[in-house]
Image: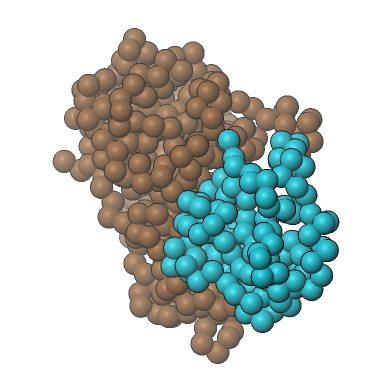
Chain colours: A brown, B cyan
Amino acid sequence: MSTEAETSLKRTALYDLHIAANAKMVPFAGYTMPVQYPEGVMKEHLHTRNHAGLFDVSHMGQIIVSGEGAAAALERLLPIDVQALAVNQQSYALFTNPKGGISDDLIITRWAKDRFFLIVNAACKEQDLAYLQQQLKGFDVHAVADQCLLALQGLAAKEVMASLAPAACELLFMQGCRAEIDGADCFITRSGYTGEDGFEISVAAGDAQQLAAALLRFNSVQWIGLGARDSLRLEAGLCLYGHDMNDDISPVEAGLLWSISKSRRIDGEKAGGFPGAEIIFQQISAGVARKRVGFRGEGRVPVREGAEIIDDAGTVVGKICSGGYGPSIEAVVAMGYVPTELAVPGTRLNAMVRGKPRPIVVTKMPFVEQRYFRG
Amino acid sequence: MSNTPTELKYASSHEWARLEDDGTIIVGISDHAQQALGDVVFVENPELGTTLAAGDEAGVVESVKAASDIYAPVGGEVIAVNEVLEDAPETINADPYHDGWFYRLQPTDIAELENLLDADAYVQQCEDE
C-alpha cells in the first residue's frame, strides 16, 4: 500500500489504545482498524464467548434523524413499523432499494417521539447519510460528529456493566438507556453482533479512552479485533453487508423477511410504501429462486467467500458468501446462496476449494445458541 | 519476538529447509510465518511422489483468517508428509521447527540449498517487510 493511502486512513479516538495493546492494524472502510491483538483470532473469539470482549466499532456511522413526523417519514425508507417503536426501543432494519435489493442494514433506536438514532455500516455511511438527507427534506439529518461506539459482548458483559452502570442491566435485548460511566455520558443498548448477551455504548470521542480503560480494568474484559468479530457473527448466523447481502439481493432471498414488520407486509394496516415493496411482496407470494442458507463443512478445509457450490452432478448451483472456521463449534461454517429447492437442512452439496470438491451440509442457523437477554 | 534457528536455511516465502544426515530435506514454515498467520486450522500438503521444482506451489496453510500458499524452497520428490498435521494443524503454531514440519523431499540438486537465505538474512528480510 502506498504511503499516501496509509496516511489518508482515518483513526478512531481509540487508536492509541490499540497500538499500546499491540494490535495488528489493517485498512477497513477508510479507517485503520485492529484486526487482531497478540492473542490471535481464535483465542479472542473464545474469550468473547466465555468471558467478555471489548470491540472498537467507532468506524460505524451514527446518524440522528429528527423533526415532527420523523417516524412516518422514516417508514417511507424502512420496511418496519417505526411509529410503533417505544422510546428507547430499537429495531434491526434494512434500507431497501427500488429493485427490492438491500442498500444497507442498520439498527434504529427511538430516542424521543420525533428523534431517532441510526447505526449504519462504516462502508455505507456517507451514502446512507446523503440518501437520508435527500429523502427526508425538512428534517434534521446529521451524522454525530466525534462520537465513538464500543461493544462489550459475552458471558461476563452483564457482570461488568452491573458495577459500572447498573441501570443498563435492567435493559432487555434491543432496548437502550442513557447512563453515566466514570463521569462520561453514554447511550447504552443491549445489543451486539456476536450472538452473545452484551451492550453497545455510544460515547463522545473525548471520553472514549477513559471509558475503554474503565472497562478493561475488569479481568474478564479484553480487546477483541475485527477478525474475531467476523467469526463470532458468522457462528451466530448474522449477515454482513456487502457479503451476505447487497443491492442485488432481496430480504426474501437473504432470509431476512423477519425484519419486515407485519404491519408493513401486503396484508398489514400500513402495507408497502417503502422502496421495492411491490417486488418484495411478489417474491413473498410467488417465492424466490435462491435463498441464503448456512453450511457446515464435513472436513477441516475452510470454505470461504467466493467458493462455488456444486451438486452431485458437478453443476455449479451457487456461491459461498461468508465462511471460515468456527472456533466455538470447532468446525467449518459458511453461508451461501443456493436454489430454493436445495435450501433444506440436511441437503448435501460440495464447495469447490482450490479445484477440489469439499462436502458441505445445509444446516439451520445460528450455529451457536444465541444468548440474548430477553428477561 | 520470533525464533530463527541458525542451522536452517530459509526461503524468502517463509519456508525453512533442513538437510538431514541421509541427504533428504525437511520443509516447514518459520516461526515468523506461523505468528503472522495466526491459529492454523488446516494444512494441505503436497501428495506423496509429487516432484516439485524450487519455488513451486507445494500446498496451502489455512488460519482462521485466511489461506496462504506454501512453496518448495528447493526442488525434489515428496517422500513423506507430516500426517500429524491432518488432525492437529495447530502443531505448526506450537512447534514450527520440529513437530510442525510439513514434508520431506529427496532433493533434485542439493546445491539449491545455497540459493536460500541464512538465518541472519532471513531475519533482516522479516524486519524489512
Tell me where residue B41 appears, x and y as whole percent: 48, 59
| Quadrant of the drawing holding the N terminus of chain B | top right
In the image: residue B79, left or right of residue A15: right
Tell me where residue A180 appears, x and y as whole percent: 31, 15
Q: Can residue A30 be seen in this view?
A: yes
Relative depth, front residue between A70 and B127: B127
In the image: residue B11, left or right of residue B31: right
Relative depth, front residue between B105 and A103: B105
Residue under the image location 55 percent in, 65 percent down: B43
Residue under the image location 77 percent in, 69 percent down: B75
Compared to residue A56, the image places residue B82 above or below, namely below
Relative depth, front residue between A307 and A18: A18
| Quadrant of the drawing holding the C terminus of chain B | top right
In the image: residue B100, left or right of residue A113: right
Relative depth, front residue between A294 and A339: A294
Compared to residue A366, the image places residue A165 above or below, namely above
Compared to residue A82, the image places residue A138 above or below, namely above
Residue sticking out furthest to the left: A375
Residue sticking out furthest to the top: A183
Q: Can residue A287 be seen in this view?
A: no
